[in-house]
Image (cartoon, rainbow, N blue to C red):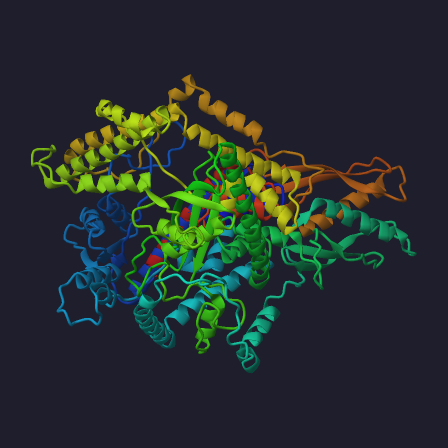
């Protein structure tokens, strides 16, 4: 279940294990175990999806039959392609996932042929094919169908979305008269040409059947069961999606969208007119403002409170699930406490009961945690309520929150998924009824504030560390440092074709010191235009503005009509650094960034004679160099090639080579000469013949994790928020941190850099050779699209056993049969299995020859089995030892060996439905659920199996759709 859910999220096994260990305090399964289950689940889901697509195709055929279309049935289709980076096919031993050579271009024509062959196998013809302007999929379908139907012709039709974009580009680049558009400048006139349009996509089977129905079919196909409690949450998610689809297409909503777009355009024009009076920075402009507007409105209009009250009723977390077969996250020492409490209270009652039989009478859901009450069916004894989780003590009135919910929202903030996908992962991947959205949001707000305060204090400490380094080097007060600044937006393109103004609504700007080798982040600024409360009130018809223009909490700190300015963010960074008596001497920014200018203006308020010097970013400098070289006018005979396209390719390779040569030469000379520019200038003429190219890149992640590492950062966050990380889960987090550190060191070794260069050169060589040979492969031949058997390099596995040795060592180091007895992590168990455990331990204890009137049970062995656990108890008074009891359900398979646990299959199945993978899924388990995650290898193996099963299911489903 866990790996099934991880496949539905954007995180992988690593993040899932992290979420279990750090977020739910459950020792996660090993990476190998998770990978194995993930492979299985992937195969199952792939098979399920293939069968489903076949069924859907049969459904489409049935619709045509009802409409009177004769056999073979002909249908219109819409085709689009998404490119992925693949490697060899079948050029090595083992399973090869690639089916196209790296040197061959990904051809929409060939993929269209395969689509035509798939549809033709079910006696269906394609009449119309809707494609984009540069797609050749329709031509491929036409050629494939002509093999058996020579007189048939597929007509291509234009995609309305791409057609609309082409129309937008044509209209946006047209030469209109000067008075056509309102505005005093060219920029204002061009802004008024834009329009709003969008679309979204999801996986095939979920799109065809909905979240809940699709997941139910996948569960039946793979072999696990979805409990009624978890399925109820999935159905609720599906209903929300369907309601949203219907609501977005209603005339009222479309009219409202148009009105809101018009209001945004009007506000944008007015703000642009007024902005010329707000160019200069004034004292107190960046200070936070108190929210005092529209306080009276909450007294007059009670609709907001009514909606929240109804939501609280419908999504209460204090629900009872007794007959439900879902899994729950519990602490094993609390299960031991439950066992002893039930047995001892039962023995202390006045009525003697020699043959007790306990059953679960009440199970109370408390966020992500549970409380339970047991009774004896023989003597009507009822136990007190026992918490199976730890609480976080708070000074506030009311019940204390469970630490598991706090851990979950803390880990969710480290992953690219939010509350909605997190609830889906719990319901679909772990079969755990998730907390309500309101509960998670409330805890998330608290955790975000705590982590922000922690990070601010941490950045101040890091800046003091940098000041201490400067002090040792002899730099006088106030200390001055060089920094590197960059800004990241929540959009790939800053210019929007859908709405006025910028395409981004959030931006974060970071400043990294360049004094130490750690490159600590010493300042950060976040600008946000989004506010849920403001949008909700606007939707109710109230005229409110953000920021701070309404009652309640306003999360926005920038007006929606104001542009996200790197200049203003640079000012705030300068003020943050100046508060600790530190000045910025050099600021490294990209070419179009004004962050250095903002820092300079902020520091000049208290230091009028100080000046910040801007330096060019080497990465953007290299890109500018590439663009200049690629657009230069060379002579006609400069590059080899018979066509302009081939010559352009040669010029592109030369530009890339020039950029790489210059970067490599300058970096190496800087190291050799310790940054002495005079020596570098003298050496430059001697290195013009350099032939090695260099690759350089960068990545970004959250500030505190970058500064401290995954394990250390999470330990500090746990102490700050108030929960505890168990030793078992922390061990997995430390292992992840060591892997990251080893990978960083390895990527910078000369051997790895040399290998990268050799591989890049080999790719270029293979690409040139393939281009030369491709002119002989233009025509389609019979059998060209048939799958080839993997027969290459089979002999190599007999001679070289290194691959098997690596897998064997990984299996030893990441075995899923580990014992965690003294660990305080959480585990995912089935409550009916806990009831079985209680009865087995008590009855076997009573059946022994030695009488023990006052038993005291303790956990003696806890066996980790993928995402699940087995346990053995003993009595400390009479040395009784119970048999091993599984706290999970198995999936029966015809294969030899132990049956897999259904939870791991569910996890990889759910991961395939989300944008996170095995790595993020393991992080989510380890950090968010405090559960030790399965190994990557285990999850990958199950994921492959599930993918195949779902593919087959989807194929059959598409065939049914085609019949309809």
Tell me, yes or no, if residue 430 can be seen here. no
Q: Which of the pair 265/228 is nearer the observer? A: 265
In this rendering, would 798 be left or right of 879? left
Q: Is residue 959 above or below residue 308?
A: above
Q: Residue 72 location, x and y as percent?
A: 25, 56
Residue at 20% over, 51% down: 134
Tell me, yes or no, if residue 67 can be seen here. yes
- Quadrant of the drawing holding the C terminus: bottom left
Q: Residue 476 location, x and y as percent?
A: 49, 38
Q: Residue furthest front?
A: 609
Quarter residue 561 falls in: bottom left
Q: Is residue 605 above or below residue 639?
A: below
Quarter residue 302 falls in: bottom right
In this rendering, would 557 be left or right of 427? left
Q: Which of the pair 207/648 is nearer the observer? A: 648
Q: Residue furthest right?
A: 350
Q: Residue 623 location, x and y as percent?
A: 27, 41
In this rendering, would 325 be left or right of 740? right
């Amino acid at each position: 279940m866990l790996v099934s859910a991880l496949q539905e999220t954007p995180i992988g096994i690593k993040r899932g294990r992290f979420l279990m260990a750090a977020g739910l305090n459950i020792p996660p399964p090993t990476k190998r175990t998770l990978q194995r289950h993930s492979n299985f689940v992937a195969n199952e889901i792939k098979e399920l999806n293939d069968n489903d697509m076949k069924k859907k195709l049969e459904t489409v055929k049935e619709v045509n039959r009802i409409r009177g279309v004769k056999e073979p049935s002909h249908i219109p289709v819409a085709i689009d392609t998404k490119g992925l980076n693949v490697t060899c096919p079948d050029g090595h031993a083992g399973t090869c996932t690639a089916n196209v050579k790296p040197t061959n271009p990904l051809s929409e024509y060939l993929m269209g042929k395969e689509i035509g062959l798939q549809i033709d196998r079910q006696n269906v013809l394609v009449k119309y094919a809707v494609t984009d302007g540069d797609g050749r999929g329709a031509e491929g379908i036409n050629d494939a169908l002509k093999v058996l139907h020579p007189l048939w012709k597929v007509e291509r039709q234009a995609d309305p979305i791409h057609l609309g974009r082409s129309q937008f580009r044509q209209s946006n680049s047209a030469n209109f008269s000067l008075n056509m558009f309102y505005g005093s400048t060219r920029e204002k006139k061009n802004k008024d040409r834009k329009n709003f349009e969008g679309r979204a996509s999801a996986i095939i089977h979920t799109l065809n059947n909905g979240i809940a129905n699709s997941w139910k079919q996948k569960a039946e196909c793979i072999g696990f069961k979805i409990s009624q409690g978890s399925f109820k949450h999935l159905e609720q998610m599906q209903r929300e999606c369907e309601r949203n689809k219907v609501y977005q297409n209603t005339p009222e909503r479309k009219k409202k969208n148009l009105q809101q777009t018009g209001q945004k355009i009007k506000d944008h024009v007015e703000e642009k007119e007024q902005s010329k009076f707000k160019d200069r920075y004034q004292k107190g402009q960046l200070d936070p403002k108190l929210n005092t507007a529209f306080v009276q409105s909450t007294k007059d209009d009670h609709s907001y409170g009514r909606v929240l009250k109804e939501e609280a009723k419908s999504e209460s977390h204090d629900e009872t699930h007794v007959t439900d077969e879902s899994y729950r996250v519990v602490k094993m020492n609390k299960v031991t406490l439950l066992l002893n409490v039930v047995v001892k209270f039962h023995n202390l009652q006045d009525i003697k009961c020699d043959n007790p039989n306990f059953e679960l009478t009440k199970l109370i859901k408390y966020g992500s945690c549970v409380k339970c009450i047991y009774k004896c069916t023989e003597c009507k004894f009822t136990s007190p309520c026992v918490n199976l989780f730890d609480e976080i003590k708070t000074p506030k009135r009311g019940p204390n929150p469970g630490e598991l919910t706090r851990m979950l929202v803390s880990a969710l903030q480290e992953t690219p998924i939010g509350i909605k996908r997190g609830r889906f992962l719990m319901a679909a991947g772990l079969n755990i009824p998730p907390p309500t959205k309101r509960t998670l949001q409330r805890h998330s707000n608290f955790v975000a504030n705590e982590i922000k305060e922690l990070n601010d204090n941490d950045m101040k400490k890091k800046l003091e560390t940098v000041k201490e380094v400067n002090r040792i080097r002899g730099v006088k007060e106030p200390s001055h440092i060089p920094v590197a600044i960059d800004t990241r937006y929540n959009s790939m393109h800053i210019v929007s074709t859908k709405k006025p103004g910028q395409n981004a609504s959030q931006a974060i700007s970071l400043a990294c010191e360049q004094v130490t080798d750690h490159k600590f982040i010493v300042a950060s600024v976040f600008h946000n235009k989004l506010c849920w409360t403001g949008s909700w009130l606007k939707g109710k018809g109230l005229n409110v503005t953000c920021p701070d223009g309404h009652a309640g909490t306003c999360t926005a700190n920038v007006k929606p009509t104001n542009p996200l300015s790197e200049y203003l963010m640079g000012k705030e960074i300068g003020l943050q650094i100046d508060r600790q008596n530190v000045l910025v001497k050099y600021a490294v920014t990209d070419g179009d960034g004004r962050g250095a200018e903002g820092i300079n203006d902020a520091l000049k308020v208290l230091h009028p004679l100080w000046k910040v010097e801007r330096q060019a970013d080497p990465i953007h400098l290299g890109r500018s160099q590439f663009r200049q070289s690629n657009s230069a006018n060379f002579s006609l005979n400069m590059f080899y090639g018979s066509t302009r396209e081939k010559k352009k390719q040669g010029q592109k390779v030369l530009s890339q080579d020039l950029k790489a040569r210059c970067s490599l030469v300058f970096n190496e000379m800087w190291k050799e000469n310790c940054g002495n520019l005079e020596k570098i200038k003298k050496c430059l003429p001697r290195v013009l013949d350099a032939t090695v190219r260099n690759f350089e890149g960068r990545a970004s992640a959250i500030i505190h994790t970058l500064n401290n590492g995954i394990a250390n950062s999470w330990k500090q966050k746990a102490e700050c928020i108030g929960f505890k990380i168990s030793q078992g889960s922390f061990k997995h987090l430390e292992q992840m941190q060591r892997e990251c550190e080893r990978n960083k060191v390895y990527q910078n070794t000369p051997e790895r850099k040399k290998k990268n260069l050799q591989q890049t050169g080999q790719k270029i060589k293979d690409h040139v050779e393939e281009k030369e040979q491709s002119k002989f492969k233009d025509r389609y031949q019979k059998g060209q699209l048939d799958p080839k058997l993997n027969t290459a390099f089979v002999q190599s596995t007999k001679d070289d056993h290194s691959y098997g040795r690596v897998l064997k060592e990984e299996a030893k180091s990441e075995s899923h049969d580990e014992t965690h007895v003294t660990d305080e992590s959480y585990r995912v168990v089935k409550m009916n299995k806990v009831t079985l455990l209680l009865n087995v331990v008590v009855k076997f204890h009573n059946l022994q020859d030695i009488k023990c009137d006052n038993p005291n049970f303790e956990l003696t062995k806890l066996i980790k089995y993928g995402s699940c656990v087995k346990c053995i108890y003993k009595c400390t008074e009479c040395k009784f030892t119970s048999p091993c009891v599984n706290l999970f359900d198995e999936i029966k398979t015809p294969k030899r060996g132990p049956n897999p646990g259904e939870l791991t299959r569910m996890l990889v199945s759910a991961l395939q439905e989300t944008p996170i993978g095995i790595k993020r899924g393991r992080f989510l388990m380890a950090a968010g659920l405090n559960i030790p995650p399965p190994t990557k290898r285990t999850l990958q193996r199950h994921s492959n199996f599930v993918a195949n099963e779902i593919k087959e299911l989807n194929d059959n489903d598409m065939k049914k759709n085609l019949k309809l």
